[in-house]
Image (cartoon, rainbow, N blue to C red):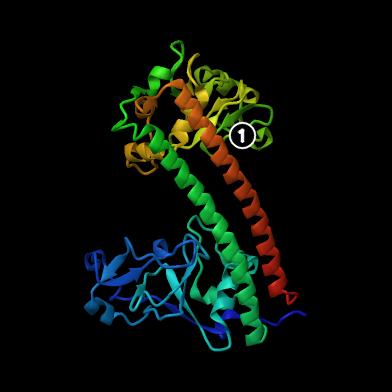
Amino acid sequence: MSWPLVNLGKLCKLVNGDRGSNYPSKDSILFEGIPFINAGNLTEVHSIACSGANYISEERYDLLSNGKVQQGDILFCLRGSLGKFAVVDSSILKGAIASSLVIIRPDTSLDGGYLKNYLRSTLCSREISRFENGAAQPNLSAKDLREFQIPLPPLPEQQRIAAILDKADAIRRKRQQAIQLADDFLRAVFLDMFGDPVTNPKGWKVVELSTLVDPDDKLNYGVVQPGDHEEDGVPLVRSGDLSDVTPDVSQLRRVSTSIDSKHRKSKLKGNEILIACVGTIGRVGWVSEAMIGWNIARAVTRIPIREGVNREYVYRYLQNPVVQGYFERETRAVAQPTLNVGLIAKTPVALPPHDLQTAFLERYRAIQAYKERLLVALGAQDELAGCLSQRAFAGQL
């Protein structure tokens, strides 16, 4: 059976933050006190992370006329990351919200767990799309949120649905945690075998990445001004295209042959590793034979590895979280994070004996295979959870 659709505003009190003269200014923000919660404090698991949060004094909190949170409230993001939300639990005795959030406070006819599952469902996503304004910084208002339609079964049925969907989500999160543990284990294996390449506690030979480059070639970035997409042009690899696999050529941007000819030095030859140097700093890509003749964008640095160097070892080495941390530390703090070619060239690469390089790659492949199985299982779990959610809110569960 289908449940009646009810506007969210009829089932919840929606409370904006205080936007008047008492709104905390920068001078009012402290390192401790009462949490002043913004969108950045809402986690992917719908909790509130107060570490690194802004705080206000008791006196400033008392001046606020709106936006004070209570246990069981749901804090919903109205700007930027639309739909991101978190539940206020007993760990927050007092708190107030910034203007980017709104408090959703359900009445007794709406179960909090049921509401939480609705907010992470495709139904809510469609409502967000219906009301968001399409601006560069998308936003909603509390008035829009009041108009969101939610299926409303009887309270016992809401609780039953919430229990089922929470179990499905718990299984999904366990798989996500296992994937994170696999990444953590890989980092631990790397440190155990090689140590930090910067401090080099094991005394391996450490060289700069540039010394592993073909002497007849050099590190360089690609096309600065690609112009319009040319359907019959040369495929252009951008930072978002970098991965272990060959990008789908039908999805790539293409540049004209005239622009490509002006950037012959960055054309791919098949012996390169690619690193994102703008935006998604440090993402690493592998150039396959199918990519020979393609070109790269300005946001990508091409690293032509010379003969005799274990290219796969260098590739996996650069992917490791330890080295990724080096890239993050070296990033220049500008409007868009940038890692210049000179800094990439100086990346320290530990060169242990060949048998240890091979042993590391074997361990990497085993961990990666396990992680890929987890990702497949997570994808299936996501699909199942989505199906359960759709059936639940359609009254078919």
| Residue 122 seen from this side | yes
Q: Quadrant of the C terminus?
A: bottom right
Q: What residue type is disc 1 on?
A: Val
In the rendered view, tell whether residue 184 sits above or below residue 384: above
352 or 220: nearer the eye?
Answer: 352
Relative image position of residue 217 (x, y in whole percent): 46, 14
Count up the numbered dots.
1
Residue marked by disc 1: 245
User: Residue 27 placed where, x, y %?
Assistant: 22, 65
Nearer the observer, 332 or 175: 175
In the image, taking residue 92 as reference, residue 126 lies left or right, namely right
How crowded is the residue under tag 1: few (<14 C-alpha within 10 Å), some, or many (20+)? few
Q: Which residue sits at x=54%, y=74%?
A: 145
In the depicted structure, whether residue 90 falls above or below residue 235: below
SS class of the residue under badge 1? loop
Please state the horizontal and vertical placement of residue 121, each as a whole percent of the image: 62, 67
Left or right? Give the position of 371 relative to 222.
Answer: right
Can you tell which quarter of the image residue 94 is in? bottom left
In the image, residue 42 sits, relative to residue 71, either above or below, namely above
Q: Is residue 229 above or below residue 75?
A: above
Asked if residue 279 shows in the view, the reply is no
Residue at 46% in and 78% down: 73
